[in-house]
Amino acid sequence: MTGRGWSTRQIALALYPFGAGAMGVNVFFAALIFSWVGGPILSTGWAIAIGCVIGVPATWAFARHIRHLMDAADAQASD
């Protein structure tokens, strides 16, 4: 890591609301699809709560990927 720009933690904190929202939508729609085979339909509150929990590792992984791309771009620019 070059240390220039935002750290992975800062990127993750900035992107967390989007990651949690995306995971909440995915959980809700997965529950709707699961209902076709007899599963329960989650309320929006439960989908949001589960999305907030799953959003943490998903956002962290995405932030690491973004940080890697930033480092690769910095390395390419310095060559």
Image: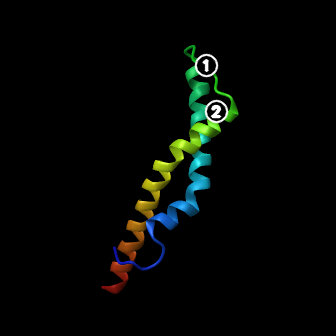
Determine the secondary structure under disc 2: helix
Figure check: 47 above or below 33: below
Query: Residue at coordinates 55% horizontally, 22% vertically from top-left?
Result: 34
Q: Quadrant of residue 65?
A: bottom left
Q: Residue furthest left?
A: 79
Nearest to viewer (mark 1 / mark 2) = 2
Query: Residue at coordinates 62% horizontally, 47% vertically from top-left?
Result: 21
- What is the x, y in percent for residue 12? 51, 60
Residue 50 disc label: none
Q: Quadrant of residue 48?
A: top right
Nearest the viewer among 70 and 60 is 60
Q: Residue furthest bottom?
A: 78
Other-residue count near label 2 (Cα within 10 Å), few / some / many at <14 / 14–19 / ≥20: some
Measured in 3D between alpha carbons, the distance from the residue under mark 1 to the one under mark 2, in whole angstroms, is: 12 Å
Query: Residue at coordinates 39% horizontally, 78% vertically from top-left?
Result: 3
- What is the x, y in percent for residue 77? 37, 83
Query: Residue at coordinates 38% horizontally, 66% vertically from top-left?
Result: 68
Q: Say which label, 1 or 2, has the lower sequence index.
A: 1
Q: Amino acid at mark 2?
A: Trp
In the image: residue 25, left or right of residue 71: right
- What is the x, y in percent for residue 62? 46, 56
Q: Amino acid at mark 1?
A: Pro
Residue under label 2: 46
In the image: residue 29, left or right of residue 58: right
- What is the x, y in percent for residue 44? 69, 34
Residue under label 1: 40
Q: How many numbered marks are there?
A: 2
Figure check: 78 above or below 64: below
Q: Quadrant of residue 66?
A: bottom left
Q: Residue furthest top?
A: 38
Determine the secondary structure under disc 1: loop
